Image (cartoon, helix red, strand yellow):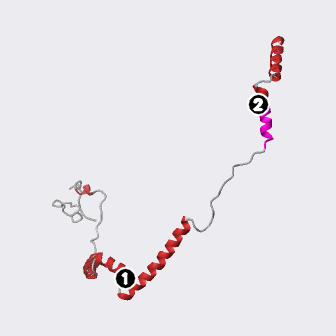
Amino acid sequence: MSRQLLRFRNVGSLLTRQNGPISSVKNTRTLASQSDAHHEQHNFPVEDFSGGFWKGTLLVIGGIFAWSKLDESLLSKSEQHPITKFIERFMTPEEVWRDINQKELKLVADYVEDSFLLREDVRPKYRALRYPEMFERASPHFLVAGEQADLSDLVLKGHRY
């Protein structure tokens, strides 16, 4: 076993003594760490007010100014603005809406009168039976005269709440 260790130890020392690729990698690495390199030169564009943003801003400001002057000249000729006239052309006339509102007001007034009538109405008081089938199970025996009504012709009907 000691012979194998000695053999590996000799091979390692032989590799370090060679002038092969291992020693050239070490030399390159040491030179690269001491080299003095600079980054690339960047040429930035000239920063002035001739860019696209400023051109667009100037056009928008000019358009707003021109529109205000045009708007003043249009209003001096007529009472209504042309945009208002254009919108009114596609709107429903005022008379139609007035008629619709009058009909709706009449329907609401009728509904309120009906609700007052129904609110004044008083429902009859009733006693709900838990077991309505007890009418059918009543025994004819042991009845005191006058305490029990004749229920032979009684018909149960569904009631509304």
- Report the span colored magenta: 25-35
Nearest the viewer among 102 and 13 is 13
Q: Tell me the SS state at disc 1.
A: loop
Percent from the top left, x then y, of residue 17? 83, 22
Residue appearing at x 51%, y 68% in the figure = 56
Q: Tell me the SS state at disc 2.
A: helix
Q: Which residue is denoted by mark 1 in the rendering?
A: 81
- Mark 2 or mark 1, which is nearer the start of the sequence? 2
Nearest the viewer among 85 and 155 is 85
Give the foreground label among 1 and 2: 2
Residue appearing at x 32%, y 80% in the figure = 85
Q: Is residue 45 left or right of residue 105?
A: right
Percent from the top left, x then y, of residue 11? 80, 17
Q: Is residue 29 above or below residue 13?
A: below
Q: Calculate the distance from the C-alpha at mark 1 to the C-alpha at mark 2.
A: 84 Å
Question: Label 2 near label 1: C-beta < 8 Å?
Answer: no
